[in-house]
Image (tube, rainbow, N blue to C red):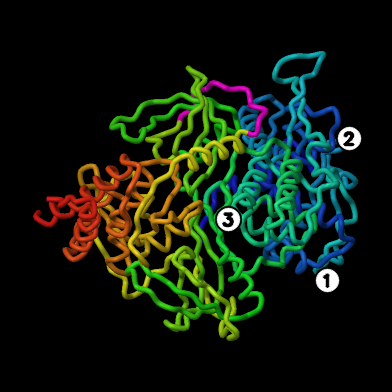
Amino acid sequence: MSPGSAAGAPRVPVEERLFSLVLALLATDTGLTKNEILSTVQGYRQRYDHGGKNANLERQFERDKDDIRDLGVPLETIESPAESGNQHLRYRIPRGSYELPSDITFSVEETAILGLAAMVWREGALSTESRRALVKLRSLGGSSDEPVLGYAPTLRVRDSAFEPLRTALDKHQVVRFAYLKPGELESRVRTVIPLALVQHQGRWHLAAEETGTGAQRTFLLRRIVGQVAATGEIFDPRADDESARALRELEEVWSSHTAVVEVELESDAATRLRKRRGTVTAPSGALELHYSDLNIIADELAAFGPEVLVLSPVELRDAVRSRLVLTARNHRENAHD
Amino acid sequence: MTKRPPTLQATDKLAFLLSLVPWLIDRAQVSVAETAKHFGMTEQEIRDAVMLIAVSGIPGETHQYQDGDLFDIAWDRFEDDDEIVLTHLVAIDDSPRFSGREAAALIAGLQYLSALPENADRGAIDSLMAKLARGASTRPSEMAVEAGETDAAVALIREAVATGVQVEFDYVNSRGDHEHRHADPLRIESVDTDWYLRAWCHLRGAVRIFRLDRISALTLTALPIQFHVGDVPLPDELFEGSADDLFVTVEVTPAALSLIADYIPDDAERATVGDRVRTSVRVSHYHALKRLVAGLPGMVTVVEPPEARRAVVEWAAAGAARYGVEPG
């Protein structure tokens, strides 16, 4: 093999270059400099110019580093104490933080339930990531031929704000977005530190801290208008379990709101609302329901048309009534077109 | 064939290579067929991966990728018997850790499934989640999902599947009709907070989907099921179109489009009319439509046919009338 002949060198597949890079960085204790990597590692060396014009190759290396880190490979940068400057940084993958600790094993039952947990995501980045996690899980040997028979559960992420927010969360980036608060006509721009993404009652929420006031706020992803932008500012990650706290708080809000509704006997509303989580049937036959957001439950109850009559709170009664009036009017006006 | 972006494909292949090597190390020898089955890939994909591993390694002291710096396999076994035997190893001993995002995806999935009857042992699920977090190279993303609410019906249905007996139950459909059904349970499905039973319905003589919250008085029968999972094709999509479906033209605010995405046929036209999108939705009957539209007030308006509009008006006006309002 003759290194260095850039012209006419056989093309090395991307995965071979990435694999060779991981192997080279795992094998070194002291780390390799960028130049050592570009001039010796398979996939780079074929394109390395000993004359020094390697700007394209360096950019390739930067992208490869990101790709490798995205897979959970802890590619480290160490500064050489004697020298300084970009060219003297050394790169390596410390074995201890690369390898799965040897005491982590998964039983057949655990492997089966993890297979089901991965299946929950059917689209987008979460689906790619969970499939990749399953490949790593199979690496440990756990058999996957035991399908959990008869389940096809799914979670959906349809909010376009989800992926940018998740990236910002992982990279500790402050974000800015326009938010349409329920009951307001105009959206307002918010700048926040994202703390957690949580799904509660089928809807995705962002728990965040406002940068100006430090106040904690919860945003519904479906009310975020337009793009989520990173401001360029980085925040210090929190030590607490923010997602568990956010979920707990949403649950508290949910249980603190109670609506009382009357349902038509044996109707769809009667069957379904009675089975809703937390519903209590009062001695009068009325149902007491919990909810997080007045506007959302108003939409849900309006769908039941005459099968539901809201008794309290009065704001919810008004909200459902005006929704039904609006729907009837919109369709009448159309009818007279 | 759909083509994925090349970098994605390459990183997925890399994750596979890093996972395959330790698995092969743990096995002195293994067939290509078994490896393909274990990883859910084709035999050719496995052969390609093994050939790549066999010529890979580290630059070594000479920077020349000398023989001792490369992986090696028993080539004769590979070529003659389709068997994989690693004869020389480089750099890799153990399986890679999960990324923080990978661990978070599985943890959130587990949280969602934690209410299933199989997961009654809460401690086991917690320890599994803790293991995933510990097995990740960075802290899992701050993400959480509320446990999916499943009622006692799920446990009964699971029991019916396990013992191979039919279930019977009362069902209220979206028309408000009550029917008593006998069914062979095939699969429990869900989307977020909505749970469904996919079953062979003996009343209809076909596979039907039932909302769990519309099922009541569910009991197991002594009758053996006639159809098992695998006997009948089950669709990947929750809602399947039927030849009897009705097509309705609607105008939707852009924000509400994703909320009705399940009802919009793939080939539906989408035209912008003012600040709205005009498209069509497919429904089984107007009873389903009126509920859908009344639940998205001001966001979705039915354009035609007139019978569909009438169904919505009557439904909403009857609802308003309960509050003593006559919408004009």
Q: Is residue A277 visible?
A: yes
Label 3 to label 1, Cα distance in Å? Answer: 38 Å
x and y percent of residue A199 in the render?
52, 44
Find residue A120 and name its label. Answer: 3
Disc 3 secondary structure class: loop
x and y percent of residue B114 in the render?
64, 54
Q: Which residues are magenta?
A: A229-241
Q: Is residue A232 left or right of residue B179?
A: right
Disc 2 secondary structure class: loop
Q: Residue furthest left?
A: A336
Label 1 to label 2, Cα distance in Å? Answer: 35 Å
Q: Residue furthest front?
A: A283
- State whether discs 2 and 3 lie on one chain: no
Q: B89 or A207: which is nearer to us?
A: A207
Residue at 90% across, 46% down: B68
> How packed is label 1: few (under 14 Cα within 10 Å), some, or many (20 or more)?
few
Residue at 55% across, 61% down: B151
Residue at 72% across, 67% down: A145
| Residue A230 magenta-highlighted | yes
| Mark nearer the viewer, 3 or 1 | 3
Q: Which quarter of the figure has residue A153?
A: bottom right
Q: Which quarter of the figure has residue B84?
A: bottom right
| Residue B130 magenta-highlighted | no
Residue at mark 1: chain: B
> How packed is label 2: few (under 14 Cα within 10 Å), some, or many (20 or more)?
few
Residue at 49% across, 75% down: B169
Give the amino acid type for the residue marked by disc 2 in the picture.
Glu
Give the residue at mark 2.
B61
Residue at mark 3: chain: A
Mark 1 or mark 2: whose residue is earlier in sequence: 2
